[in-house]
Amino acid sequence: MFPDDLEIWLNHFEYHARHPRRIPHGLSDRLTPPERRLIASSLATFQLGEQSQGGALLRAAAHFARRQRLPNLVRITALFIREEQRHAELLRGFMEDHRIPLKSSDWTDRVFRRVRRLAGLELYLHVLISAELIGNVYYRTLEAATGCLRLKVLCRTLVADELAHIGFESHLLLALRARHRAPVRALVRLAHRAFFAGTASVVWLTHRTLLRHCGHDARSFLGLCLAQYAFYLEPAAAPLASTPAP
Ligand SMILES: [Fe+2]
Ligand SMILES: [Fe+2]
């Protein structure tokens, strides 16, 4: 990537900052009591994951941007964090209207936050893109399964943004990986894939009641997550004919 690519991403995020996502008023908003019970805890965990002040990410991006002379990266990162906060707001609005309790902490969220603070931008991106890829599968699954039109549109709206986030992060991550020598690159790839598969398995375990209701067993959920992973992070290895569209 760089710096021309970053200019394109900056334009993208600036545009979205000027036109923040909204859910149209007047959509049918009926959530049955069994559906509310089914999604409440799971959705609250994802809502928590969307909200972050992003201080550690901003610091890592600023440090990297200074060293590489990429000033746009700092602004892009700030706009990206704002977009994630907007997701948290949209989810919170839906949850409050349906009296779904918010979470202030969850062990999976704490682990994610701790791991990504461990080192610089590259490690942070590896953790972040794992959450984004799995979130993308989760929101699409939820959209297909819910009968509530407002929740369907909300999920689709989040996915639209997450796809751009994943595009940006994979673009940056592959550029960062390309700077390593081949053996290091291979090791990083293996370690990240193992981390990603482990994380997707934990998400399956902790959200399995909802995911099963949406028609997934552990194997199909993991398969979908890994297909997304291959599409964005192993483009040369992904068989085009059998790779689902992102
Ligand atoms: Fe998000
Ligand atoms: Fe995102």
Image (cartoon, helix red, strand yellow):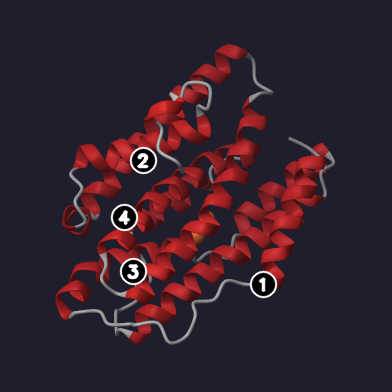
Q: Give whichever of discs 4 and 2 has the lower sequence position.
A: 4
* Disc 1 element: loop
- Residue 144: x, y in percent? 30, 59
Separation of residues labelled 4 and 3 (CA atoms): 16 Å
Residue drawn at x 44%, y 46% as measured from the top left: 133
The image shows residue 52 at horizontal and vertical percentages of: 53, 64
Question: Which amino acid, mark 2?
Answer: Cys
Q: CA distance from mark 3 to mark 1?
A: 26 Å
Label 3 vs 1, first from the N-terminus: 1
Disc 3, SS: helix
| Residue 44: mark | 3
Q: Is residue 33 visible?
A: yes
Which residue bears the numbered disc 4? Answer: 141
Q: Quadrant of residue 245?
A: top left
Q: Secondary structure at mark 2?
A: helix
Whether pointer 1 and pointer 4 mark residues with C-beta atoms closer than 8 Å, the reply is: no
Other-residue count near label 1 (Cα within 10 Å), few / some / many at <14 / 14–19 / ≥20: few
Between discs 1 and 2, the one toward the N terminus: 1
Q: Are marks 1 and 2 in contact (CB under 8 Å)?
A: no
Disc 3 to disc 2, C-alpha distance = 21 Å
Q: Which residue is mark 2?
A: 225
Q: Amino acid at mark 1?
A: His
Asked if residue 183 is positioned above or below residue 151 in the image, the reply reads: above
Q: Which residue is mark 1?
A: 19
Q: Nearer the viewer, mark 4 or mark 2?
A: 4
